[in-house]
Amino acid sequence: MEHPVLTAIRRAAFTPLGWFAPSPDDKVPEGARFVILIGNAGPDMFRRFARERDPARETMDEWTRDTVAQLARDLEARAAYPFDTDPPWPFLTWARRGGAGHVSPLGLNIHPTYGLWHAYRAALLFPVAFDLPPPAAGPHPCERCAEKPCLAACPVSAFDGTRYDVAACAGHVGREAGRECMSRGCLARHACPVGQGFAYAPAQAEFHMRAFLAARQKA
């Protein structure tokens, strides 16, 4: 799908992950008539972040605020972030509203193209509606996946199809026994066959795992 706004988002190294014209039930900020969800899928966004900031010392959230704020100004939009409010904005609900996938057995959103290898960094809120047909999420890939290898791949069985044992996951990743998870990223994600071409490179995977552990320590 080509559109000047989508092209501008891609040029800024973000991926348009879904879009929709909201209704009152969608609980978007007041005045928004069109929502485009943006984030990472593949390496481009992380590469830009690593060029502009020191991943060993700075957070992606701060860089996201700065970068998306400028993009929003350029596109005459406002920005909402998944990490800026308590309670947070319902990004996963918005994602499914915008044709960006389904809920996987891991509880993560599974995108029809990017699988589990994507993340929402912001929503661009426009005061006017665009003539963009909504993306189609397509059939739920997990319903056709009989073996569900994602549920068996975690070394500490943090996923059982109904819940995520965050403490078990973080405890394992933070120990020497969890070195593979730290360096490669979540092994349950790697087990999913959808979107494997967008799996995080080691530097990106370890950055996100370290950020996950740091957030757990602050909680």
Image (cartoon, grey):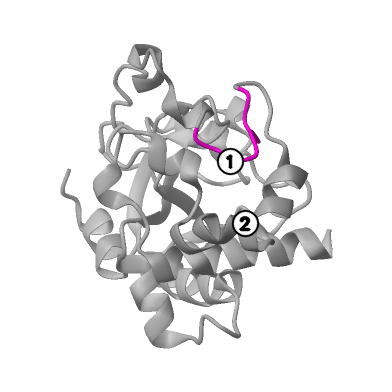
Range drawn in magenta: 153-160
Residue 66 lies, in percent from the top left, at 53, 77
Residue at (71% x, 67% y) in the render: 214
Mark identifier at residue 128: none
Question: Is 64 part of what is drawn in magenta?
Answer: no
Indicate whether 49 appears above or below 216: below
* Kind of residue indicated by mark 2: Ala
Question: Which residue is nearer to you in this view: 178 or 38?
Answer: 178
**Do tag 2 and tag 1 residues touch (Cβ < 8 Å)?**
yes
Q: Nearer the viewer, residue 152 or 118?
A: 152
Q: Which residue is mark 1?
A: 155
Vertical position of residue 52 compared to residue 73: above or below? below
- Residue at horizontal 57 percent and vertical 46 percent from the top: 31
Which element carries disc 1, helix, strand or loop? Answer: loop
* Residue 177 badge: 2
Mark nearer the N terminus (2 vs 1): 1
Q: Residue 90: image x %, image y %? A: 62, 39
